[in-house]
Image (cartoon, helix red, strand yellow):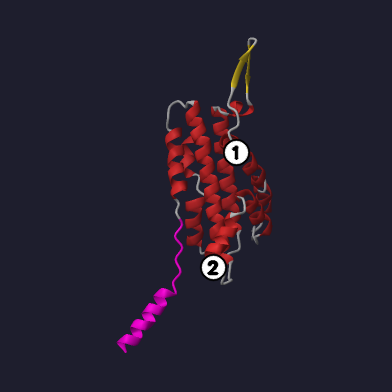
Amino acid sequence: MEIENAKEDITIKESIRMEIESDYLIISNREKCKKILAKPELEDNDLIDFFIAIHIVLEVGLNTFYRHIYLSEIQKTIDRIKIIKNVDNISFIDKTILFIYNSKFDFQGKIEDADKYHSILDEIKNFSEIRNKLLHGHSMATIYEDGATKQSELRKLINPQRLEQQVKRFNFIMEGMRFYFDCLKSNFSPAGKQTIEDSYLNDSFLNKAS
């Protein structure tokens, strides 16, 4: 009898599926952003580091968020690692478009908010501009010629005003994503939704900058 019970216990334990996702890039770059924003004065190198770090938080966070969404809905017996690989091949901007247009929401009379947050699609594209230019090696030149000063397009973006703009865009994108996720018809429990929001749609680390 004891042997039979032991076999049943093993079967139950073996049937449990666990998914462990590394959040190192999100957490470490949130901390980097906080340390940079805590400085009394920011140099150009600080601004560059911030623009890259805040983009990593956004892109990695949203990509991880969408993996949780898709994997929770898939009922096929296909290898989940293959599913993750295919989902990861879609850009986070395209995944956001699909999420907003193809998901089932219950806006509960908040259709005006839904319309307002639809603009996060444009905000994400604008948000990505500076990171793309930095990592693709665009010129950051300042040219002094014939008594005049000219700056490259990217050089003009490296300033504290752009940092403030990026922070506001990030806050608005996260606010919009939390709104859509709260309205999403899904199998997530309220506690499960809150955990995902805290992990991947959180902008509280930027509070001092707002």
According to the picture, the residue beneath numbered tag 2 turns out to be 79
Q: Residue at x 44, y 60 (%)?
A: 20
The answer to whether residue 110 is visible is: no
The answer to whether residue 61 is visible is: yes
Q: Residues within 10 Å of mark 1 (few under 14, many from 20)?
A: few
Q: Residue furthest left?
A: 2
* Quarter of the view holding residue 105: bottom right
**Label of residue 132 in the image:** 1
Magenta span:
1-21
- Look at the image and tell me in which quarter the N terminus lies: bottom left
**Label of residue 109 in the image:** none
Q: Residues within 10 Å of mark 2 (few under 14, many from 20)?
A: few
Q: Amino acid at mark 2?
A: Asp
Question: Residue 127: horizontal and vertical position, in percent?
Answer: 60, 39
Q: Residue furthest front?
A: 137
Q: Nearer the viewer, residue 56 or 42?
A: 56
- Spatial CA span between label 1 and label 2: 33 Å
* Quarter of the view holding residue 6: bottom left
Question: Residue 72: horizontal and vertical position, in percent?
Answer: 55, 65
